Image (tube, grey):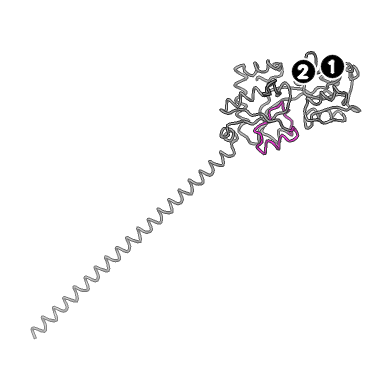
Amino acid sequence: MKKRLVLAAAMILALSLSACGAKEAETEAQATAAAETEAAGSGTETEAAETEAEEAQTAAEAASDEAAAESDMAYVKDKGTLVVGITNFEPMDYPDADGNWIGFDADMANAFAESLGVKAEFIEINWDYKVMELDGQNIDCVWNGMTLTDEVKAAMEVSEPYCENAQVLVVPADKAADYEGLTSLEGLNVAVESGSAGEDAALALGASTVPVQTQADTLMEVAAGTSDAAVIDLLMAGAMIGEGTSYEDLTFTLNLNEAQGLPSEEYGVGFRKGSDLAAAFNEFWAEKAADGTALEIATTYGLQDAVILE
């Protein structure tokens, strides 16, 4: 009997120890699983944070690239040239004996390009398509004695005016008396540069216009007698008409009369709409006006009274 009691006690003790061991193992397994779950969750959060950071960096880089692409200054500096759209318009832009472009605008364009760390490249354009050439990035600016009309201001990012001008009526010198006291240009064939402020002025005064490609061509029309008169810029007339020029037999008048004078105007440089080059030009011009460079170049071409220095 005693042996049976001892044996039973031994069996109970063994079962108790077995149950405790199982419980401890279960508790340990649960703790391990919980730790693994927590680690996995932490890893997921870390990966999500890393992904979010990468996406933010990518977005920032894309925004930076987009901003650079929209910066005309960055674009011009990257390619190393400032492409200037011009026509043959003395004294603003015209070729010298060697075919190099000179003139007040050409000289200033070269100086502006140098201030940007690039070179100026000049391309003759059809004036009617100047906005298309600009927006298509065939040129980077229009710098050719361009009148700052409302239409131009709407289509381009324009600089502050740098030069004053007026439209004048060009006629044969021996017929100048016939044009005194006119109140309109009705009944006259008047040569004008197509798309120019001169064309607008001639039409407003009732002329039958003869559109040609450049202002220089209008003078050829009058000299040849194929047009009665021409309306062109004062600055060009002063440089190309009269004694010592190719058109000594032509003259010009500033006004038809006090009531219907041809309009005065201001010149500016045109850039693509929203271009940061316009602000860069304004800073450049202010500097060159202050240090005397602009006046010195203007005097070279007889424009000292037209240039805007303040």
Residue to which mark 1 is pinned = 249
Identify the residue at horizontal 13%, vertical 78% (top origin): 10
- Secondary structure found at label 1: loop
Q: Which mark is residue 62?
A: none
Whether residue 247 can be seen here: yes
Which comes sooner in the sequence, label 2 or label 1?
2
Q: Position of residue 110 (x, y in %)?
A: 62, 24
User: Which amino acid type is shown beneath numbered disc 2?
Assistant: Gly
Q: Is residue 62 magenta-colored? A: no
Residue numbers of the magenta segment: 126-151
Q: From the image, which quarter does the C terminus lie in?
A: top right
Q: Quadrant of residue 39?
A: bottom left
Q: Is residue 72 left or right of residue 129?
A: left
Q: Position of residue 256 (x, y in %)?
A: 85, 21
Q: Quadrant of residue 288?
A: top right
Q: Position of residue 281 (x, y in %)?
A: 62, 27
- Secondary structure found at label 2: helix
Q: Is residue 144 magenta-colored? A: yes
